[in-house]
Each structure stands twice: as structure tokens, then as C-alpha cells.
Amino acid sequence: MRWMRRLAWVLKSVLLVTSIVVCVLWMRSYWRADWIRYIEVSGAGELITRKISGAGSMSGCVVVGVSRAFMTGVGAGDDLREEFGLTGLSPGWNARSRPLDSSGLRYYDDDSGWGPVRWKREISEVLTHNSGRSREDMQYVRVSDWSLATVFGAWPITSSMLSARHTIQRRRRARAGLCLACGYDLRATPDGTGGLVTRCPECGREA
């Protein structure tokens, strides 16, 4: 049983720290957009394919999404990469933070979902300035920060409050000469001047 209590303590600590981090991101997300992404790029010349998987925080929500895209066309590879939004991004893990503006919020205008959980899938295909063709399949799920903070923090906060209440109650009972388990009066004499009985006559717990 001791290892179970230790495991529960570790889990509650991790959940509480996670809830605090979400609250910090929640406040920050209204003026900064933070992203961490993994980028995979392949191809050269007339064909480039790209996949971006990542998560971010912006406008009071956490967004997790995947974007798969490819571009074909005649022209230099640098032009295609610029059209494709790959300039300045290297394959692998990338972390970015930028001031929040309205351009990043246009994808959220018509998404579907229920309550704090929303999702969307968008497939777009356009012609590039090189007479090529670009196709992108983008899908994401976003969850409001307040709901995540509530889910992660409900158990550890409630448990801590109940534990504090239980500790205060036990201390009050000990000072008053009452049984710590059931609250029965353990004083041997009615006026409270005598010593305490060795065992609670109500629940049997040793004093």
C-alpha cells in the first residue's frame, strides 16, 4: 500500500505541475503564439513534399495538428520552397514564438466540434507563380486552455484540500482530547481534568 500512496503522490505532483504550465501558457497565449513542430521535407527540383507535425498555444487554446503537402512545378527549388513556406525552416524539430496577430486565427472561424474541443480538416489546391501546383492537407484538434487546466488540476487540488482539512481536524481533536478517528470524548472524567482513556470505547482505536 505504501508504494501505491507514493505513486499517487507522484501522479498528483505531475498533474499539478502540468496544470500550472497550462495556466501560464493560457495567459501568454493572448499576445504570443508558441509552437513546437517536427518538419520532414523530401524531394528537389520540380517536386517537393513536406509534412509538419506539431503543437502550439495561441488565443487561449492548445492546438495539435498535422499538415501534409506537396508541390510540383517548373522552376528553381528555392522558389518552390518559398511558395511552400519552407524558407528559414530546417527539417527536424523547430520551436518558434511570435507575436499573435489575426492572420493565424483565420483557420478557426469555421471549425467543428463540441464545447471546448474543436477540430477541422482542410484540403487546398492552388496554382503557383511557376505554373506549378500546390496541394495541402491540413487537420488539427484544439482544446481550450481552461478545460485542460481543470482536467489536470482537479484531482491534485481536490486531494490537497481534503488532506489539509483532515490534518486540521485531527489536530483539533487531539487538542480537545477527542478520538482522532471518530471524535469521541476520550477524557476519563466529565470535567476533563483526568487523563485520557487508553482505547476509544466507541470505535476501538488506541488513543
Image (tube, rainbow, N blue to C red):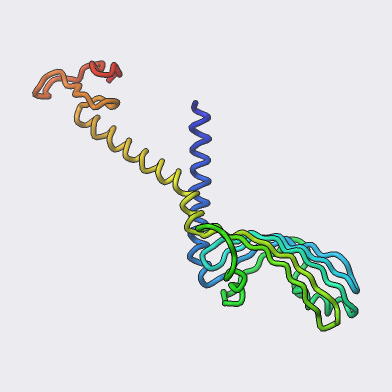
Q: Give the residue at x 79% y 62%.
A: 40
The answer to which quarter of the image holds residue 53 is: bottom right
Residue 157: give x, y in percent of width and height.
42, 46
- Outermost residue toward the left? 191
From this view, report whether residue 72 is shown above or below residue 53: below
- Horizontal arrangement in the rendering, residue 191 relative to residue 169 (left or right): left
The number of discs equals 0
Residue 153: give x, y in percent of width and height.
46, 49
Residue 108: give x, y in percent of width and height.
59, 68
From this view, report whether residue 79 is shown above or below residue 42: below
Q: Give the residue at x 57% y 64%.
A: 57
The answer to which quarter of the image holds residue 36 is: bottom right
Q: Give the residue at x 56% y 74%.
A: 100
Q: Quadrant of the C terminus?
A: top left
Residue 195: give x, y in percent of width and height.
17, 20
Q: Which of 195 and 73 is in front in this view?
A: 73
Q: Nearer the viewer, residue 23 or 69?
A: 69
- Horizontal arrangement in the rendering, residue 155 relative to residue 98 (left or right): left
Q: Give the residue at x 61% y 59%.
A: 141
